[in-house]
Amino acid sequence: MSETPSRDQSRDAMSVAAISSDRIQSDDNVWTRRLVFFLRIMAVISVAKGLYHWAQVTGFVGGEDEAFENQPMAWQTATVYFAVIELVAAVGLWLATPWGAVVWLTTVVSMAVIELMFPGIYGGSLLIVGFEALMLAAYLALAWMAARERPP
């Protein structure tokens, strides 16, 4: 009878050791998990932005004066471009793939360039440029910290 409790204790000790080693191992990738969480948040934002642009194209947003066909060609082109690329970026971001980050970075830079260099298209909002720059800086910081976690 004395052998049975010691076997149970050794089994419990092994299971506790396995649990604690998993916990330690998962803490090693804390920045990677934060990066993936950030990418998922940006994916949700990209879906919202993409659907908003599609709502502009289809006429769900705005009145007759703001209808898609009544807008200048530059506005129409930019709106269709962002309607497509934002949703593609959202899929890649949600999956945390490298191509998703590249497509998302393309959307960020494209929006900043359109707002700064072509203010006639969307109005040149510095608030949008600031938000895009802040999200870009956050991504770069998180990616850098996640890369430092993994030795070469």
Image (cartoon, rainbow, N blue to C red):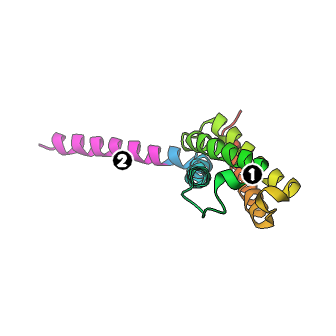
Q: Is residue 122 positioned above or below 76 on the image?
A: below
Label annotation for residue 33: none
For mark 1, does the 10 Å Cα neighbourhood hold few (<14), some (14 to 19), or many (20 or more) residues?
Answer: some
User: Looking at the image, is mark 1 or mark 2 earlier in the sequence?
Assistant: 2
Query: Is the magenta region chiefly helix, strand or loop?
Result: helix
Q: Quadrant of the C terminus?
A: top right
Where residue 110 appears, x then y in whole percent? 77, 47
Q: Nearer the viewer, residue 105 or 3?
A: 105
Where residue 92 appears, x then y in whole percent? 59, 39
Q: Nearer the viewer, mark 1 or mark 2?
A: 1
Q: Is residue 139 visible?
A: yes
Q: Nearer the viewer, residue 112 or 101?
A: 112
Q: Amino acid at mark 2?
A: Val
Q: Nearer the viewer, residue 140 or 51?
A: 51
Q: Nearer the viewer, residue 108 or 28?
A: 108
Q: Residue furthest bottom?
A: 127
> Residue beneath label 1, please?
75
* C-alpha separation, residue under disc 1 versus residue under disc 2: 61 Å
Q: Is residue 144 visible?
A: no
Quadrant of res 104: top right
Q: Residue furthest right?
A: 117
Where residue 143 appears, x then y in whole percent? 70, 46
> Residue beneath label 2, please?
16
Q: Residue furthest left?
A: 1
Q: Amino acid at mark 1?
A: Trp
Q: In terms of secondary structure, where does tag 1 sit?
A: helix
Query: Position of 5 compared to 102: left or right?
Result: left
Q: Is residue 62 positioned above or below 88 on the image?
A: below
Quadrant of res 59: bottom right
User: Looking at the image, which residue is at 67% across and 50% down?
Assistant: 69
Query: Position of 90 compared to 137: left or right?
Result: left
Magenta-highlighted residues: 1-23
